Image (cartoon, grey):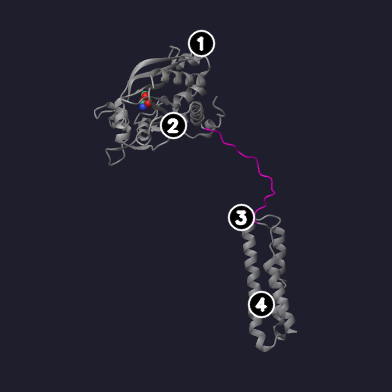
Amino acid sequence: MSDNIFEKVSTLLNEINLSNPGTDEDLETFRIRFLGTKNIIKPLFAEMKNVPNEQKKEFGLKLNQLKQAAEAKYSSCQSALNSGTTTSKGTSIDLSVPPGPLNIGARHPVSLVLNHMIDVFSRIGFTVAEDREIEDDWHNFTAMNTPEHHPARDMQDTFYLEGSDSMLLRTHTSSVQARVMTTQKPPIRIIAPGRVFRNETISARSHCQFHQVEGLFVDKGVSFADMKQTLLYFAREMYGAKTDIRLRPSYFPFTEPSAEMDVWLGTETDITRRLTKGTGWLEVLGCGMVDPNVLENCGIDSEVYSGYAFGIGIERSAMQKYDISDIRLLFENDNRFLGQFTSAF
Ligand code: DAH
């Protein structure tokens, strides 16, 4: 007789352990069966009188164990149900449930323009070189032939790191030229996209952070004509096959001679007149032949090698492309603005 009762207890314990109520309904059925006022465990306590004295203690323990197992199972299934990780089948995740509609993000206009530029230059053999945004004085200025007294070193333009007069947030991607030339041997043909920082008053037209794409080509016998043809190719890929360019003499410490490149947008529409201030020409980049001092600073023999370099501002191209009137919109992370841009060109 007592064997029978012991067997019944272990059958019930098994049942509790194996059960997995995965819906509110199943859980309620479980509760009524094992924990309700007329639960199945209760009458077993009354069986105690039929159990031989020497087994009474063990039987009591078993009954308590049964009760505790039922309570534990109930509360774990209840919290699983509440947290929504259980399904009608009682498995932890139902992979067959169709997903809700996916919200697909949009690329940032700066990324769209940047990716397009990378694509254009990759096609003619330029590889992407990326480097640090926190730079030292030497790579950002000295190596780039910018003497100590140059206004670009003025504290007003440059963010120096607190407590340091040599570590700074790079003011241009030209620092990557120094990083690459000190670690690689010519021929070098890279573009360096990235974020740069200047201590400027934030307005509709300027920001304290923006993006540039730097270009550098160093080899034997590289000429100004090579640079001009490369930049013409770039302009035509970006602005259309018939685009004209002009190079205006300019000054940069790290190039000699230096130039600024404009592209012809014309004066036919309001937009192009506004962008070009009525001239029809839009300034898009600075460029020039790498100054021999820069090559020497980086350990490259300027008697053997020559090169050209250029730096393009991304925000201005993006603003022109998408007719964005205020640069601050590009840094505010407002999804209503950012969701509008789907493809670059
Ligand atoms: N670093 C310059 C700037 O931030 C842009 C530039 C001009 C880069 C001429 C160049 C270059 O490589 O040759 O204004």
Q: Is residue 41 visible?
A: no
- Secondary structure, magenta segment, majority class: loop
Provide residue 218's location: percent of width, then percent of height: 38, 27
Determine whether label 2 and label 3 are within 8 Å by CB.
no
Residues at marks 4 and 3, CA–CA distance in whole angstroms = 31 Å
Which mark is first along the chain, 4 or 1? 4
Please name the residue that numbered disc 4 is placed on: 63
Is disc 4 placed on a helix, strand or loop? helix
Indicate yes or no: mark 2 CB to ligand 1 under 8 Å: no
Q: CA distance from mark 3 to mark 1?
A: 62 Å
Residue 180 or residue 66, whichever sits in front: 180
Q: Of discs 2 and 1, which sits in the foreground?
A: 2
Q: Give the residue number, with chain letter if any, for mark 3.
A: 83
Amino acid beneath label 4: Leu
Work out how far the residue at label 2 is from the one at label 3, CA to CA, in angstroms: 45 Å
Cα–Cα span, label 4 and label 2: 72 Å
Q: Which residue is mark 2?
A: 193
Tell me the magenta residue range: 92-107
- In percent of width and height, residue 254 lies at 32, 25
- The residue singled out by tag 1 in the image is 268
Q: Callout 3 environment at 10 Å: few (<14), some (14 to 19), or many (20+)?
A: few
User: Is the CB of the residue bearing disc 3 within 8 angstroms of ligand 1?
Assistant: no
Question: Of label 2 and label 1, which has the lower sequence position?
Answer: 2
Q: What residue occupies the far left of the structure in this picture?
A: 149
Amino acid type, residue under disc 3 in the picture: Ser
Which residue occupies 36% across, 18% down? 259
Quadrant location, the N terminus: bottom right
x 72%, y 61%: residue:
26
Q: Viewer-nearest of labels 3 and 1?
A: 1
Residue 108 or 335: which is nearer the viewer?
A: 108
3D distance between C-alphas at marks 2 and 1:
32 Å
